[in-house]
Image: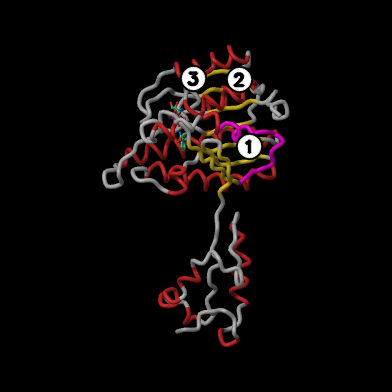
Amino acid sequence: MSDKLSFKGRVVVITGAGGGLGRVYALEFAKRGASVVVNDLGGSLGGEGNNMRAADVVVSEIQEKFKAKAVANHDSVTDNAEGIVQTALDSFGRLDVIVNNAGILRDSSFLKMQDPAFGAVIDVHLTGAFKLTKAAWPHFRRQNFGRIINTCSPAGLYGNFGQANYSAAKLGLVGFSESIAKEGYKNNINVNCIVPLARSRMTEKVIPPHILKNLAPEKIAPMVIYLSHESTKVTNSIFELAAGFYSQVRWERSSGQIFNPDPKSFTAEAIFDQWSSIVDYKDKTFNKVTHPTQLSDYNALITKARQLPHASQGTKTINSL
Ligand code: NAI
């Protein structure tokens, strides 16, 4: 199987690959024949400082283990994303895959969170991914091929105490990915989000050791590899990955309630009366529970609402006012 998903001739950029998850991805891509740009500024968990050794060590590891081609880049994703792409072009002549993985944490309760902590986290995760993707995009379009993996988080999907900044950045990446997946589709540019949970310096102090021991970062890499491969057509999707569990996450819209076209029915009291129908995820008899993936998925609902006969004609509508 590993022969099947070969990356021979492909060039991959992984940001924040000097340690943690990014390092594991870099090794796995290299093992499968890719040429790898190992980007990392070598900062602390909070993003301070820079230790160029982090990326250099991973490059040496790749060269020793796999005799593969790898090069270090020490730019910050926030300051010189173009430079990261340029490193790929100068070193290997092309670019096929980007894994937006670089990240920092500046956790604090919302009460105590100040502007710099919010801004820095948005900058590295969201703006950094934007800048690198923007720099790679023309090359992907020109060659009619590109694979982009953006790294979200359970904190982004579900929220987490003390991580309002991080959650905003991570869910921002989902919206970003969903939009550019649509724009990239016709040029064979696939964009997906992963939602990992793994052992790294980010989690080692917050997850108990008996759980941490199951969270090897090597268990995240297979999905990153799969989604990045030329044979994989999956795009516009979110995958949750932890401890060997691989799943897809999607949006779900309740079956909802279409109110009577009579303008008198659009009132807060009508919402009050019909609350259980509005948030109903089980009722299959009226509108179906749906899993929207694009804006136009509203069209059917809007059409249905406009065509709806009045309550007196017996359709399930608001008629209690
Ligand atoms: P990590 O701290 O080991 O790795 C992050 C790397 O990004 C570090 O090597 C760091 O130097 C680098 N980095 C930070 N700012 C940078 C910048 N401006 N430019 C270039 N590199 C920069 O943490 P880990 O766990 O490996 O995280 C990887 C990604 O996965 C992050 O985006 C993180 O938010 C995400 N993630 C991790 C989870 C986990 O359970 N470990 C859970 C959910 C998401």
Dot 3 surroundings within 10 Å: few (below 14), some, or many (20 or more)?
many
Q: Quadrant of residue 285?
A: bottom right
Per the image, the residue denoted by label 2 is 90
Question: Which numbered circle lies on residue 37?
Answer: none
Task: Tell me the residue at 50%/43% (across/down).
Answer: 173
Per the image, the residue denoted by label 3 is 55
Question: Which numbered circle lies on residue 227?
Answer: 1
Above or below: residue 272 compared with residue 213: below
Above or below: residue 307 compared with residue 212: below
Q: CA distance from mark 3 to mark 2?
A: 18 Å
Task: Tell me the residue at 49%/41% (across/down).
Answer: 152
Task: Residue 55: give x, y in percent of width and height.
Answer: 49, 19
> Which of disc 3 and disc 1 is earlier in sequence?
3
Task: Residue 229: give x, y in percent of width and height.
Answer: 67, 33
Between 223 and 171, the residue placed more toward the observer is: 223
> Which of disc 2 and disc 3 is earlier in sequence?
3
Above or below: residue 265 compared with residue 5: below
Amino acid found under the numbered disc labelled 1: Leu
Amino acid found under the numbered disc labelled 2: Asp
Above or below: residue 153 compared with residue 318: above
Please provide the residue range marked out in magenta.
220-236
- Per the image, label 3 sits on a secondary structure element best described as helix
**Label 2 vs label 1, nearer the camera:** 1
